Image (tube, rainbow, N blue to C red):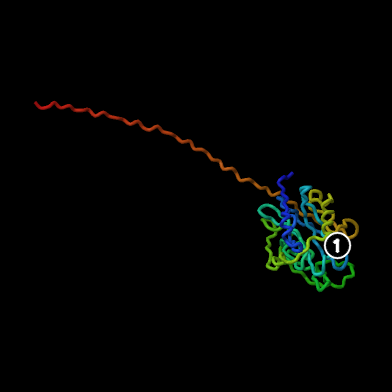
């Protein structure tokens, strides 16, 4: 179909040099020339238990299938108290779309200004905060359902960004957002990569044909789950509306410059006319 996909990985040497606990958006970097679909509309399932954090769904790329697939949003136990989730995001860079991996950290970093919803309005996280080893949830954006959770509060979240479902940053059609000083500082803080539960969740999504954008056309039947890796039963919700699919970005080669050789006209030099001057012979005087 489209054969100019590119997959590149950071050299293994770089992974050895960087501290293992500071892997902010370090890992496999995927670069493709097809924009990810818009984010689908879906309802957040209720939280399964205390200590869980919401990780929003996103479009991931499968190099094997040469297309996008949906990774459902899900609730995940925080790897340790005090840590929050910074979602990954797609960024447009000179016509290509590059994936920046998400990570766990004490502060939420930059995630492209993408409005993932449910506390991730484009900058920071408004769905809750840690106080000691307890996580307090903002019920105005988080669905606690009937779960017996008393560490809650209600604070209205005001979004100053345009509400849309664009799933990438940069370019003419992407979200126009730049990281703040606080978000830049968060990049250099201590981080943790995806947990084992999250990794399994991604693998299951990749292997599920119904989650491929080519099959669901931006409207995944499993949009979100109550627990990572559980794709059936209670707590699984379908998308209520699909996202638009984009055509691949066409890289046009520069038109060849045609060099036309102008014929050089060689004109023969005009002949030089040699006029013989008559010689007058005067007779010598007698």
- Residue for point 84% across, 64% down: 77
Q: Nearer the viewer, residue 166 or 30?
A: 30
Q: Nearer the viewer, residue 12 or 151?
A: 12
Q: Is 84 rendered above or below residue 215?
A: below
Residue annotated with mark 1: 45
Is residue 178 rendered to the left or right of residue 148? Answer: left
Q: Position of residue 171 (x, y in %)?
A: 67, 56
Residue occupying the far left of the picture: 286
Q: Is residue 276 left or right of residue 84?
A: left
Q: Position of residue 131 (x, y in %)?
A: 81, 73
List x then y, in percent, for residue 228.
85, 59
Whether residue 83 is visible to the viewer of this picture, yes or no, is yes
Instruction: State the SS at label 1.
Output: loop
| The C terminus - image quarter | top left
Which of the 4 image quadrants contains residue 110? bottom right
Whether 147 is drawn above or below 14: the answer is below
């Amino acid at each position: 179909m489209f054969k100019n996909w590119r997959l590149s990985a950071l050299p293994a040497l770089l992974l050895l040099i960087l501290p293992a606990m500071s892997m902010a958006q370090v890992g496999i970097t995927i670069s493709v020339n097809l924009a990810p679909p818009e984010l689908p509309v879906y309802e957040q399932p209720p939280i399964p238990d205390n200590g869980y954090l919401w990780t929003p769904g996103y479009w991931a790329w499968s190099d094997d299938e040469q297309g996008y697939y949906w990774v459902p949003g899900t609730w995940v136990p925080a790897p340790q108290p005090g840590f929050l989730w910074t979602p990954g995001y797609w960024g447009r860079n000179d016509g290509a779309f590059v994936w920046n991996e998400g990570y766990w950290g004490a502060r939420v970093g930059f995630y492209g200004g993408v409005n993932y919803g449910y506390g991730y309005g484009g900058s920071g996280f408004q769905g809750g905060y840690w106080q000691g080893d307890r996580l307090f949830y903002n019920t105005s954006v988080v669905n606690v359902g009937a779960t017996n959770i008393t560490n809650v509060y209600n604070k209205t979240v005001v979004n100053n960004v345009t509400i849309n479902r664009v799933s990438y940053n940069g370019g003419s059609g992407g979200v126009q957002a730049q990281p703040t000083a606080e978000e830049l500082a968060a990049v250099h803080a201590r981080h943790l990569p995806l947990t084992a539960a999250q990794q399994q969740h991604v693998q299951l999504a990749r292997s599920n044909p119904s989650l491929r954008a080519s099959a669901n056309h931006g409207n995944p039947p499993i949009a979100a789950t109550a627990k990572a890796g559980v794709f059936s039963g209670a707590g699984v919700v379908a998308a209520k509306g699909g996202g638009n699919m984009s055509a691949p970005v066409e890289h046009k080669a520069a038109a060849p410059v045609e060099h036309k050789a102008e014929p050089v006209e060689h004109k023969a030099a005009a002949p030089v006319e040699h006029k013989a001057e008559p010689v007058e012979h005067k007779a010598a005087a007698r």
